[in-house]
Image: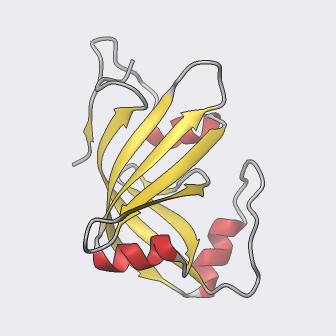
Amino acid sequence: MVIVEMSRRGTDMSLSDYFKKRVGTGVLATADASGKVNAAIYGRPHFIDEQTIVFIMADHLTHANLHANDNAVYLFRESVDRYVGRRLYLTKTGETDDPKPIEEIRAQPRHGDHPEDPHDKKYLVFFHIDRVLPLIGDTIK
């Protein structure tokens, strides 16, 4: 079960719809086994269902950290004048280097530039969404 902190007003929009309709900047934060933190710019998550997302990643520091520590936080700030967005608290549930599902995800529409090194090995990394909070504060308005 995903814990979504909501205000009294609530919202009818699903999390996957929220990310389809918003443009902004995302940061994925991970830590190694000793707790040393890393943060990296990532595009919007790709939704498998309302509790499962995936990111395509190269075998860099973020990917290495996730082998030592399955926990991550994805922070998304909308491209607006206010500090609006979401924080997704995540647990890695698996990964694959099978090129077929990676290419299927890549074929989906996306926003913004995604510089890629064609020589980097790619992984499709799966996460369970444990908790969702707003960018600032502890309730979604």
Judge whether 65 appears above or below 141 on screen.
below
Q: Residue at x 27, y 65 (%)?
A: 35
Residue 134 horizontal side relative to residue 8, left or right: right
Percent from the top left, x then y, of residue 38?
44, 62
Q: Quadrant of the C terminus?
A: top left
**In this orientation, does residue 17 appear?**
no
In percent of width and height, residue 89 lies at: 32, 49
Question: Taking 75 as reference, is 127 above or below it?
Answer: below
Q: Is residue 137 left or right of residue 46?
A: left
Q: Is residue 139 above or below residue 97?
A: above
Q: Residue 96: x, y in percent? A: 47, 83
* Residue 81 placement: quadrant: top right
Q: Give the side of residue 39 with respect to residue 115, left or right.
A: left
| Residue in view at x 44 percent, y 36 percent | 86
Nearer to us in this view, 97 or 24: 24
Using the image as rendered, state which of residue 136 and residue 11 is in the foreground.
136
